[in-house]
Image (cartoon, rainbow, N blue to C red):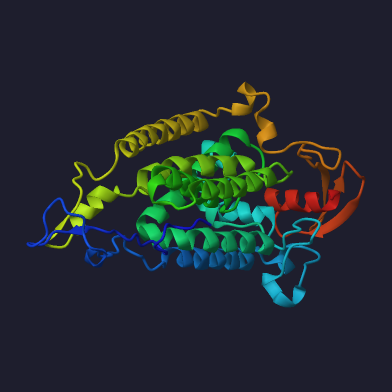
Amino acid sequence: MMGRGEAGNDSVEIKVHPRQANTPAGSPPHPSQFQNQSVFKNWVPWLVPLFVVANVAVFIAVMYVNDCPSNSGSCVAPSLGRFSFQPLKENPLLGPSSSTLEKMGALDVNRVVHKHQSWRLISCIWLHAGVFHVLANMLSLLFIGIRLEQEFGFLRVGLVYVISGFGGSLLSALFIQTGISVGASGALFGLLGGMLSELITNWTIYANKFAALLTLLCIIAVNLAVGLLPHVDNFAHIGGFLSGFFLGFVFLIRPQFKWINQKTCPRGYIAPPAQSKHQTYQYVLWVISLIVLIIGFTLGLVALFRGVNVNNNCSWCHYLSCVPTSLWSCKSQQVYCQSMELGSQLKLTCLSNGKSNMYDLSNNDSSKVQMLCAQLCS
């Protein structure tokens, strides 16, 4: 997305002035006396590809557990057997049912708060609603994450990814407390936020700084605008982006040039003096960001486990996740069905459209009944 200075690919060319015995200290050096030196390590990315493999593997496992032929009357791509997809009316993204996602660890605020399943704040970022969902996110992860891991290594990029995903889940849980939420989008927006703060804190090593900043801001704005559509959890995007933005100031910081010159200067060369590894503004941003992250996560978790719904204190905040237009509505449509047991069968009648159907159920699992009701009313 952004190009480095004259030295490509995470290497910075440092030019130092040699001092020789026959050259006066104040004399300008000859051009042949300059020496180039690569000072930033170029990491081999392996964690981001591993994340991609893990997400795809989890999606395959979810489809195996979903087993559409055993739980639904009609499936998409039935030749895939138990890996076939739910009907398009139920899941247009070619994926499992919502009840399967909930079983496998989707973000469900009721379960997080009242059943002490706080692990769902992390597990949900490894789940995806369908083939289109996982493909879009994994391509974005490769595009964004590989470059960051090459520059900063697996540990720092991995921490930004996972903590940003957690931050996205936390903000989503504070605003959207009905239904379930899945996807790695919050973590991906965290990487975008980290790229923005990395550009700011390492401003001096970029060529075409303002062009790089404008390009990155446009990419972020377009992706956040997509989150204004219905059925997209933009609060997870915003939470992930803000988390990654502040994490970038903490983890993605570069030393200043003078310090690098001092540490890498060969014998017989003079480098400009540097008193500290980083510049003053970098230390200030580091401290402020760390304080904001600690306070933000602490207050968010306290509010979540006290059952606070932030929408009750913010009348306009819901527009951050969906803006209603003449083309779509942002209101979630709750479906209701009347059920009647007839021997080993269950008769469901949708109260909104009057449709009825009979189902063979070995057990009246409430989540499965709700899924069948959603299909009947769609």
* Rendered residue at 43%/50% (across/down): 160
Q: As drawn, which residue projects farthest toward the left?
A: 21
Q: Above or below — where is 225 with respect to 266?
A: above
**Residue 50, percent from left and from top:** 46, 67
- Give left or right: position of 267 versus 146: left
Tell how many labels.
0
- Give left or right: position of 54 versus 73: left
* Rendered residue at 70%/75% (across/down): 81
Q: As drawn, which residue projects farthest toward the right?
A: 354
Q: As drawn, which residue projects farthest toward the bottom?
A: 79
**Residue 222, percent from left and from top:** 66, 47
Q: Viewer-proximal residue, 46 or 33? A: 33
Residue 99 visible in the displayed image: yes
- Give left or right: position of 124 versus 296: right
* Rendered residue at 63%/66% (across/down): 63
The image quarter in which residue 266 lies: bottom left
Q: Viewer-proximal residue, 333 or 249? A: 249
Q: Viewer-proximal residue, 29 or 47? A: 29
**Residue 13, percent from left and from top:** 32, 61
**Residue 2, percent from left and from top:** 50, 56
Residue 180 visible in the displayed image: no
Q: Viewer-proximal residue, 87 or 209? A: 209
